[in-house]
Image (cartoon, helix red, strand yellow):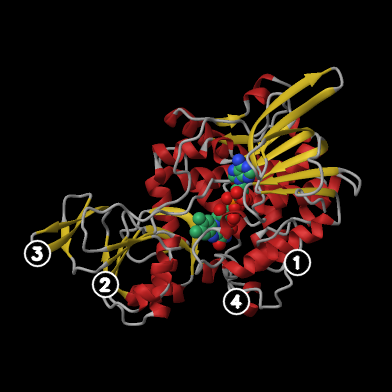
Amino acid sequence: MTDPQTDPAPERCALCIVGGGVAGLNALFSASVHLGKRDRVVLIERNPRVGGMWTETYDYVRLHQPHPMFTAGNIPWTLGREPAHLASKPEVLHHLQHCLEVLRERVDLVELYGHRYTEHEERTGPGGSEVVVRYADASGAPRELRAARLIKSFGYRIEQNDPLPVSSERVHSVAPHEAAFLGAPLAESDTPVYVVGGGKTGMDTVYDLARRQPGREVHLLAGAGTIFTNRDRAFPSGARRYWSGRTGFRTFREFALQYNGDNEQEATDWYRRTHGLCLNDRCQQFMFGVLSEHENAAISKALTGLHMEYFADVEDDGDATRLRFRSGGSLAIPPGSWIVNTSGHIMKQRRPYEPYLSDGGAVLSIQPTSAVHFLTTVASYFLTHLFMLGSIETLPLYELNQQDLLLKNKRAWSPACSTQALYNTMLIAGNVPTEVLRDFGLNFDLWFPAYRRLYDFAVLKRNAAAYGAHCRATLDRVGERYEIESGVLRRHATGAASAA
Ligand SMILES: Cc1cc2nc3c(=O)[nH]c(=O)nc-3n(C[C@H](O)[C@H](O)[C@H](O)COP(=O)(O)OP(=O)(O)OC[C@H]3O[C@@H](n4cnc5c(N)ncnc54)[C@H](O)[C@@H]3O)c2cc1C
């Protein structure tokens, strides 16, 4: 390992990866299969360590899925817990550090922490393409290096929540990661807690409050309400995995086939009835979160009030303090109440579109304006293999501007993402070497015995043409209806792409 404090900054490398989150580590894993011990790879990360959003998010977060399938490539966990264990933040960070240590042995890795990528320039000459990567070092000084290839792995640019601005001077407005919420100030008070946001963070927050302070008055402002995948069905425990539950492939295949690009309400209602779990029948938004029946019941029990409302403000009105909703309604709340902001923290800022593969072919970009899969881990694992193999140039994957779709119609997001995931997974599965599929340790369906996965594969093979036609028609309709990128990359459409 190179020490950036004492060693000179590298000038050239075979590959530069920006972003040391789990997607960046998957890029490093896949690239290491195609590179050797002498090939220099430079990892640029603005934080002081790998782990990405897991280094910054609230302390009581836990993985949604069984931990073995949250990794880089197929690197096994060393935790020694049962597979169903939902790993905590320190456990996830420990594992991602372990993945880095394993990967350090496979290439000549230079790790530049506290360094911030600023821009790049792709140059194409007679000898091929080269990328000039510009970044600021730990002191802020500008630097550059030349890379044969660049992978930008920024993911969804998840940011910590700030406390909500409130007009009232009588309430505590806090964010989930703040010491006042996690420590003595909250614990030593007995005023009600109002959790704003009904997604995964809101659920984690109510669940954690019920554990820390049983009997505390807790209210949830759930907005349109979130639908979660029922973990007991997605990951049945013990021997039940031999016959019960639904494989992830089957779930997303069925969801994709429900959707035609116009009927997101109908498709989401179907998902809620067949695979979903939520606090009440009015919940409308599915964002791929996962919850168990036990957690859902514990959260319901812990809640004094469930309000299907959006937060607007808290105002002092004479002696009264009122929590105002966006709908115009309000609620009188006691002075000293706690307002916890757990509302959405992905894609807060609209970013300019960037294709997942640059026109020159030397830059891969894993982010939501030109996504190929809603899981950045999966996208990073497969795209890096295709990138290093050279087949990314010709494989006509469907990109989807998931950022703009989410802004234009939040409800269409998950059925469209499932459709895209089914389509691109089919295309990739038919175009990568078997070892790439074998080492795909992120596959949720590894939870199930091999015969169930083989059955899914047979269904896919038998219906590939019909599924492909359905997915393309649906995604074309989404692109047309919302005027967003949804189709093959422009470079593929005009270039040498072979038909799917
Ligand atoms: C609260 C919460 C809970 C979640 N729980 C789960 C879960 O249980 N299971 C699951 O699969 N997913 C979960 N997710 C989704 C989660 O985003 C992914 O699991 C995953 O961690 C994303 O990894 P990433 O590498 O794509 O992005 P990140 O982890 O955000 O990594 C991106 C990295 O890029 C770096 N970076 C950005 N800009 C620059 C720059 N200019 N220069 C240098 N470095 C830069 C960042 O510092 C960061 O380290 C959760 C998300 C949230 C918000």
Quadrant assignment, res 393: top right
Q: Cα distance, mark 2 to mark 4? A: 36 Å
Secondary structure under the numbered disc 2 in the rendered image: loop
Residue found at the far bottom of this picture: 214
Give the spatial CA distance, label 3 vs label 1: 58 Å
Residue at image mark 3: 319
Single out the mark in the foreground, 2 or 3. Answer: 3
Q: Residue 276 in the image: x percent, y percent?
A: 44, 62
Does 189 sit left or right of 33 as displayed? left
Q: Which amino acid type corresponds to the residue marked 2 in the rendered image?
A: Pro
Q: Secondary structure at mark 3?
A: loop
**Residue sitting at x 31%, y 82%:** 215
Instruction: Look at mark 4 in the image and give the residue it sits on.
Output: 237
Q: Quadrant of the C terminus?
A: top right
Numbered tag placed on residue 76 in the rendering: 1
- Percent position (x, y) of residue 492? 68, 25
Residue nearest the viewer, comparing 150 with 483: 150
Q: Mark 2 = which residue?
A: 192
Nearer the camera: disc 3 or disc 1: 3
Question: Between tags 4 and 3, which lies in front?
Answer: 3
Residue 230 percent across, percent down from the top left: 49, 66
Label 4 crowd (10 A; few <14 / some 14-19 / many >=20): some
| Distance (Cα) linking label 4 and label 3 | 53 Å
Cβ atoms at labels 3 and 1 below 8 Å apart: no
**At numbered mark 4, what does the secondary structure look like: helix, strand or loop?**
loop
